[in-house]
C-alpha cells in the first residue's frame, strides 16, 4: 500500500519542523511546518519564487527560483541542516520547494510525500543535478535536496559535476571576489554526456548567483541545452512588507 513504509518510518523517527525542531503534529502545514512557525515562514516566503536578475549576477542559467528569503528563521534552519548536524531536514526543505516552486500537491498526511503533476504530462527537465561541495568533506545538503526532489518530480538524478580546485568560502567575499572564486572552478566528469539535456540545478542558498552560474556553464559545456537553478532560499533585501517592525523605543519618563 502506497505510503505505508513512510508512515511506519514516521512512528520510529518522527519528522520534525525544521524551523523549531518540534515533532510535527498530524495537521502540520504542507506536512512539514508546525502551526507555531507558520506565520513566520509565510512572511519569509519568496513570492513569486522566480528570482529577479536585478538582485543577482546570473550568467549561463536560463533562470532561477527559491522558496524563501534567506533571513531570520529560514536562515537559522538552513544553517542547522547544513552545518549543525541536522541533515535530515533536507527532506522537509525539498518538500517545501516541490510545493512552493513547482506547484506539487502537499501531502495529505504528516509523513507523506508531495504529489507532482507535470504540466501537460511533460516533464520540464530531463535531469536533476546538485551543486557539488566546494571543498572535500563539505556539506551534502544540495545532494540531499536533489535526491528528494528527484523522487517527487519523477526526474532522474545525476551528479556529473566536480570541483577543479580548492575554493575560498564564499562568505565574506564581495561580488567580484565571489565571481573570481568560482570562475572555472567546476567541470563535468570525464565521459559525461548531457547532449540535449534540460537541467534542473539544485543548491541550498543562492546569494549572488556566482556558484550556480559557474556550475551551469560547466553543464552547458557538457552538452546541456539549458540550466535552471533552484534553491531553498535566496539572499536578497527583504521587501518592506516582509520586514519585522522595529520595536518602539520605550518612552522617556516625564520629568516631575
Image (tube, grey):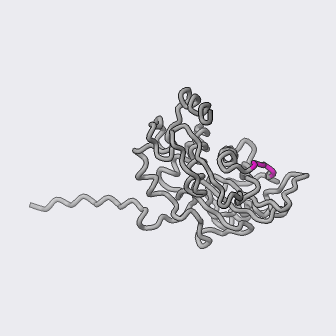
| Closer to the camera in the image, 256 or 212 | 212
Residue 122 position, x and y percent, is 71, 59
- How many numbered badges does the structure rendering display? 0
Residue at 55% x, 56% y: name it. Answer: 100
Q: Work out whether 232 lies above or below 110.
A: below
The stretch in magenta equals: 156-160
Which residue of the protein is positioned furthest toward the right in this rendering?
191
The vertical placement of 222 against 155, above or below, is below
Residue found at the very far left of the displayed protein: 256
Q: Position of residue 215 (x, y in %)?
A: 75, 59
Res. 139 visible in picture = no
Task: Estimate the x, y position of residue 97 in percent, counting from the top left.
Answer: 59, 52
Please give the name of the residue rendered at 47% of the width and 35% of the height, measured from the top-left corner: 23
Image quadrant where residue 183 sits: bottom right
x and y percentages locating residue 216 in the rendered image: 75, 62
Q: Quadrant of the N terminus?
A: top right
Q: Is residue 246 visible?
A: yes
Is 177 situated left or right of 37 in this image?
right
**What's the residue at 69%, 45% (across, down)?**
147
Magenta part mainly helix, strand or loop? Answer: loop
Q: Point out the image quarter for the C terminus.
A: bottom left
Give the camera-side residue of 172 and 23. Answer: 23
* Along the line of sight, the residue nearer the viewer: 5 or 219: 5
Query: In the rendered structure, does residue 134 fall within the stretch colored magenta?
Result: no
Left or right of residue 215: residue 95: left
Q: Tell me if residue 158 is in the magenta stretch.
A: yes
As drawn, which residue projects farthest toward the bottom?
A: 54
Amino acid at each position: 500500500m502506497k505510503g505505508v513504509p513512510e508512515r511506519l518510518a514516521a512512528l520510529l523517527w518522527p519528522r520534525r519542523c525544521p524551523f523549531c525542531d518540534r515533532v510535527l503534529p498530524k495537521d502540520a502545514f504542507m506536512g512539514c511546518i508546525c502551526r507555531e512557525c507558520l506565520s513566520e515562514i509565510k512572511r519569509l516566503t519568496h513570492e513569486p519564487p522566480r528570482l529577479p536578475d536585478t538582485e543577482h549576477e546570473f550568467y549561463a542559467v536560463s533562470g532561477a527560483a527559491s522558496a524563501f528569503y534567506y533571513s531570520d528563521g529560514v536562515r537559522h534552519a538552513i544553517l542547522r541542516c547544513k552545518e549543525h548536524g541536522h541533515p535530515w531536514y533536507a527532506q522537509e526543505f525539498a518538500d517545501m520547494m516541490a510545493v512552493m516552486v513547482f506547484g506539487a500537491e502537499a501531502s495529505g498526511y504528516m509523513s507523506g510525500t508531495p504529489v507532482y503533476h507535470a504540466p501537460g504530462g511533460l516533464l520540464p527537465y530531463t535531469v536533476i543535478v546538485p551543486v557539488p561541495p566546494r571543498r572535500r568533506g563539505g556539506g551534502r545538503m544540495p545532494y540531499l535536496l536533489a535526491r528528494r526532489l528527484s523522487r517527487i518530480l519523477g526526474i532522474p538524478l545525476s551528479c556529473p559535476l566536480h570541483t577543479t580546485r580548492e575554493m575560498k568560502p564564499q562568505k565574506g567575499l564581495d561580488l567580484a571576489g565571489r565571481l573570481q572564486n568560482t570562475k572555472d572552478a567546476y567541470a563535468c566528469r570525464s565521459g559525461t554526456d548531457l547532449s540535449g539535456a534540460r537541467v534542473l540545478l539544485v543548491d541550498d542558498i543562492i546569494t549572488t548567483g556566482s556558484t550556480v552560474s559557474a556550475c551551469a556553464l560547466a553543464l552547458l559545456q557538457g552538452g546541456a541545452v539549458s540550466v535552471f537553478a533552484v534553491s531553498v532560499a535566496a539572499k536578497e533585501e527583504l521587501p518592506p512588507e516582509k520586514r519585522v517592525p522595529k520595536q518602539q523605543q520605550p518612552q522617556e519618563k516625564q520629568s516631575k
